[in-house]
Each structure stands twice: as structure tokens, then as C-alpha cells.
Image (cartoon, grey):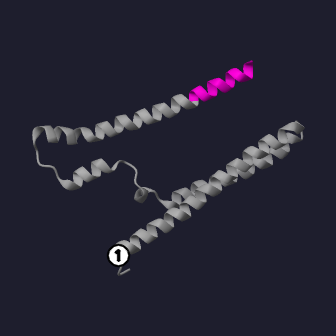
Amino acid sequence: MGMFDVAVAFWIFVAVAAVAGIAGDVIKRRQALEPLRLAIEKGQPLDPKVVETLMAGSVRAESIDPAHLQIGGIITTAAGVGVMLLSWFIAQLVRPALFPILGAGVVTVCVGIGLMVAARALERHQRKRDESADPTA
């Protein structure tokens, strides 16, 4: 029954962390839009650029640097390879642990590769957008 309790506690923690993150984002968004609401209530003229910036949100695809995704992918892939090597060393002591730990390493490598693929796709998207915005380039 002890392992079951640990699993339940883990998933409760994951759920609470996810809900807390969502709630934090909602609170930040409300605080960012509060000056806009106050300006509307007072009847002050609004600059369209300020309104657009506030309504757009905090994270945009343009603000993500593909190099950061690439670095994260390289680090994650290297960590996955390390976990796969670790599985071999642990299997020398506990033979049944080889495949579960090896599987965790493979999943980690897949996440790293996914980050690197996402970096390339984002870079291509940004390049196409820049070319379509500036046809003289």
C-alpha cells in the first residue's frame, strides 16, 4: 500500500502545481490589464499600440529564440544518454532495473530531439515570416 500512496501523492502534487501555474498566469494577466481598465473607466484616450501590447499577452512566438530551444535539446539529449548509461551500471547490481531505467533514458532523448526539431521549425517559421514581411530582402 506504501507505493500506491506515493503515486497518489505524486499525482496530487502534479495537479496542484498545474493549477497553481494556471492561476498565477490568470492573476498576472488581470494585473497587466488593470491599467487599461482604469483608463477606460476614466475616459482617457488610449494609444492603439499600448492596447495591442497589453491584449497580445506575455509570450509570443517572436520572443522565443530558437537557439535557446536548441541548447535545451542538446542538454536534454545528453542527459538522456547519461541515464541510458546509468541503466547499464545499475543493472550490474539490480538486473531487473535495466529496461525501466533504459526506457526513461530513451524518453529523455526523445524529448531532447523534439526540442531540437522544434528549434529548427521555429527558425524556419521566423525566416519565412521575415521574408514575407520584407520582400526586398
Identify the residue shown where x is 45% and y is 56%: 64
Residue corresponding to mark 1: 134
Instruction: Determine whether the residue tagged by mark 1 lies in a helix, strand or loop.
Output: loop
* 4 in magenta: yes
Q: Name, please, the residue furthest toward the top.
A: 1
Horizontal and vertical percent position of residue 69: 54, 56
Asked where in the image residue 15 lies, by quadrant, the reply is: top right
Quadrant placement of the C terminus: bottom left
Residue nearer the viewer, 131 or 87: 131
The answer to whether residue 77 is left or right of residue 84 is left
Residue 79 visible, this orientation:
no
Residue nearer the viewer, 108 or 19: 19
Identify the residue shown where x is 28% and y is 52%: 53
The answer to whether residue 67 is left or right of residue 135 is right
Horizontal and vertical percent position of residue 61: 43, 57
User: Is the magenta region chiefly helix, strand or loop?
Assistant: helix
Q: Name, please, the residue furthest toward the left.
A: 43
What crowding class fits label 1: few (fewer than 14 Cα within 10 Å), some (14-19), or many (20 or more)? few
Above or below residue 53? Residue 94 is above
Asked where in the image residue 34 lies, by quadrant, the reply is: top left
* 9 in magenta: yes
Identify the residue shown where x is 17% and y is 38%: 38
Horizontal and vertical percent position of residue 54: 28, 48
Quadrant placement of the N terminus: top right
Residue nearer the viewer, 73 or 26: 26
Residue 22 visible, this orientation:
yes
Identify the residue shown where x is 68% and y is 20%: 5
Number of numbered discs present?
1
Q: Amino acid at mark 1?
A: Asp
Task: Please state the extent of the stretch shown in magenta in the rendering.
Answer: 1-13
Horizontal and vertical percent position of residue 12: 58, 26
